[in-house]
Image (cartoon, rainbow, N blue to C red):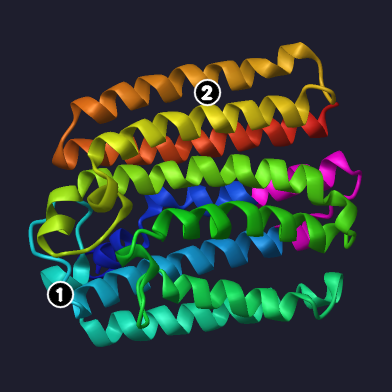
């Protein structure tokens, strides 16, 4: 039984799910800061975000296999379809079935924020597929980082806040926390692309790492983390006491340590760094949520 379930759990890429959860947490922080936090729409956003990310992960596995971009025994996380553990048809059906379910869950948010959410939901669903599929897959043309910044940063933060407080005055704080979360989420993708650089180059998959080189994206990883710290400080310093900035200080130091390990690691050694990058992002967003909630 477990042997049948295990490839599906691996395909979900659980280590990366803190990325989607973090965007919703940051949106919740915006709502808390504006005295409008509502538990039910927040939890619906959380469920939708996780389901949408898993759908995107499934789509990435299916379409990369279909396009011949994966190979057996790769350095990254095991791909069930490529290894023969999951049939392509089953993965395709799971991708579209889960994405459709996520859209139905998202439709319940119309009750809280109106029909403006319909085009937003369509855009998000399209983005979940466009990352790996379609005539111009974003991840194959150096646009994966931009997609992550938008779909796991700006968009979820703003609209998680908006369904709780349907008022565009939340935009300045949502933009700052959205960019902060987007920078951190992009770092998770950077580790992934840094690890897969040689395989992707061989398969002519034009990730940012292949286009700009490993040194550039390792330096970008460092920059993104410190940009996130700066945005956290700017968005919270006037709201809470200086003691709460210890979260930014700790994140900056742990981020620097991960950056040094990134440059010293190769292949499968980078998988734990990817997971720790996502987890550190998650912890910082919990810290910010508590900062706003307790002050």
Q: Does residue 264 sit above or below 41 in this rendering?
A: above
Span shown in magenta: 24-42
Q: Which residue is mark 2?
A: 251
Which one is nearer the viewer's eye here, 96 or 43?
96
Residue 9 appears anywhere in the view: yes
| Residue extending furthest toward the top | 243
Q: Secondary structure at mark 1?
A: loop
Q: Does residue 92 sit above or below 147 in this rendering?
A: below
Q: Secondary structure at mark 2?
A: helix
Q: Is residue 121 left or right of residue 86?
A: right
Q: Residue at x 70, y 41 (%)?
A: 176
The residue carrying pointer 1 sits among few (fewer than 14), some (14 to 19) or many (20 or more) residues within 10 Å by Cα, namely: few
| Residue extending furthest toward the front | 212
Image x and y of residue 291, in percent: 75, 28
The CA distance from mark 1 to mark 2 is 38 Å
| 17 part of magenta stretch | no
Q: Earlier in the sequence, mark 1 or mark 2?
A: 1
The residue carrying pointer 2 sits among few (fewer than 14), some (14 to 19) or many (20 or more) residues within 10 Å by Cα, namely: many
Which one is nearer the viewer's eye here, 70 or 200?
200
Q: Which residue is mark 1?
A: 68
Image x and y of residue 2, in percent: 25, 64
Residue 85 appears anywhere in the view: no
């Amino acid at each position: 039984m477990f042997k049948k379930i295990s490839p599906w759990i691996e395909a979900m890429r659980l280590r990366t799910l803190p990325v989607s959860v973090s965007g919703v947490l940051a949106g919740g922080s915006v709502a808390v800061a504006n005295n409008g936090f509502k538990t039910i729409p927040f939890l619906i956003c959380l469920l939708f975000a996780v389901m949408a990310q898993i759908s995107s992960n499934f789509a990435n596995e299916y379409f990369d296999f279909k396009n011949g971009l994966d190979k057996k025994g790769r350095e990254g996380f095991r791909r069930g379809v490529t290894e023969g553990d999951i049939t392509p048809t089953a993965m395709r059906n799971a991708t579209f079935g889960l994405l459709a379910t996520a859209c139905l869950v998202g439709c319940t948010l119309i009750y809280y924020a109106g029909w403006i959410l319909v085009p937003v939901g369509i855009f998000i669903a399209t983005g979940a597929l466009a990352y790996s599929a379609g005539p111009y897959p974003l991840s194959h043309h150096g646009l994966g980082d931009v997609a992550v910044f938008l779909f796991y940063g700006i968009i979820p933060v703003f609209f998680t806040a908006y369904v709780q407080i349907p008022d565009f005055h939340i935009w300045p704080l949502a933009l700052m926390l959205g960019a902060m979360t987007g920078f951190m989420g992009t770092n998770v993708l950077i580790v992934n692309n840094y690890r897969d650089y040689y395989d992707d180059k061989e398969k002519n998959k034009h990730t940012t790492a292949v286009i700009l080189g490993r040194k550039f994206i390792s330096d970008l990883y460092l920059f993104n983390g410190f940009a996130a710290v700066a945005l956290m400080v700017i968005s919270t310093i006037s709201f809470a006491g200086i003691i709460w900035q210890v979260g930014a200080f700790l994140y900056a130091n742990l981020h620097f340590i991960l950056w040094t390990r990134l440059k010293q690691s190769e292949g499968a050694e980078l998988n734990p760094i990817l997971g720790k990058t996502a987890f550190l992002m998650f912890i910082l967003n919990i810290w910010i949520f508590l900062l706003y909630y307790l002050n």
